[in-house]
Amino acid sequence: MAQPNETRTKLSQWDALQLESLKSLGWSNEELIARVKSGDLPKDDSKFQFDYAGLKTLAAEEPDTLKTAVENGYQIKYNTIRGIHSWIFVALRQDAELILEPGAEAVAAALTAAEAASLADALSFGWSLSAVDGAVADANGRYAYRISPAEQ
């Protein structure tokens, strides 16, 4: 179960993306941690071209942070709009809509309740995840959500 955001393990946006990329390989938590520590990691052929250097450094310098992030989840220290879009792509395997209209920047995505909860847990302070009013679930049980800067 996730910890409250105030006490959650914090990862950089790039480390979170790399971790989600590795989690998608289906390894157990123990195998993922061991492979990161040993550097026994695959070549990434995605558009991101992850080299996993940040995770290897994290494993060497802060092994408990890596372990806790893998086993209990994490919160991203600082998100960017494009970083949120990328996280949804890597972690949830979906190409969300990136909206870059000045003053109305957002990411629009169709998410299940579990996916929305996972994203909400990972978002850094300053971002809001909200269901689109009146949205109806699609055939896969996903509802329309909008991720945008939190109102001040």
Image (cartoon, grey):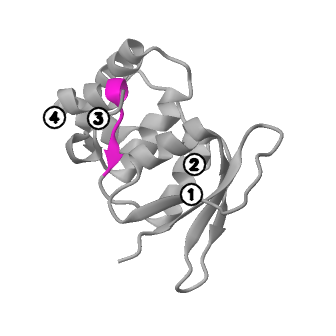
Q: Quadrant of the C terminus?
A: bottom left
Q: How many marks?
A: 4
Q: Position of residue 98 (x, y in %)?
A: 63, 66
Q: Residue at coordinates 55% horizontally, 86% vertically from top-left?
A: 102
Sequence-first disc among 1 and 4? 4
Give, as a single range, the part of the protein colored magenta.
Answer: 70-76
Label 3, on which residue?
3
Sequence-first disc among 3 and 2? 3
User: What's the residue type where badge 2 is placed?
Assistant: Ile
Outermost residue, right side: 139
Distance in Å between CA atoms under marks 4 and 2: 27 Å
**In the rendered image of this protein, does residue 85 appear above or below residue 7?**
below
Mark 4 surroundings: few (<14), some (14-19) or many (≥20) residues within 10 A: few
Left or right, residue 65 beside residue 45:
left
Sequence-first disc among 3 and 4? 3
Distance in Å between CA atoms under marks 1 and 4: 28 Å
**Comparing labels 3 and 1, the label whose residue is closer to the camera:** 3
Query: Is disc 3 placed on a helix, strand or loop?
Result: loop
Label 2, on which residue?
88
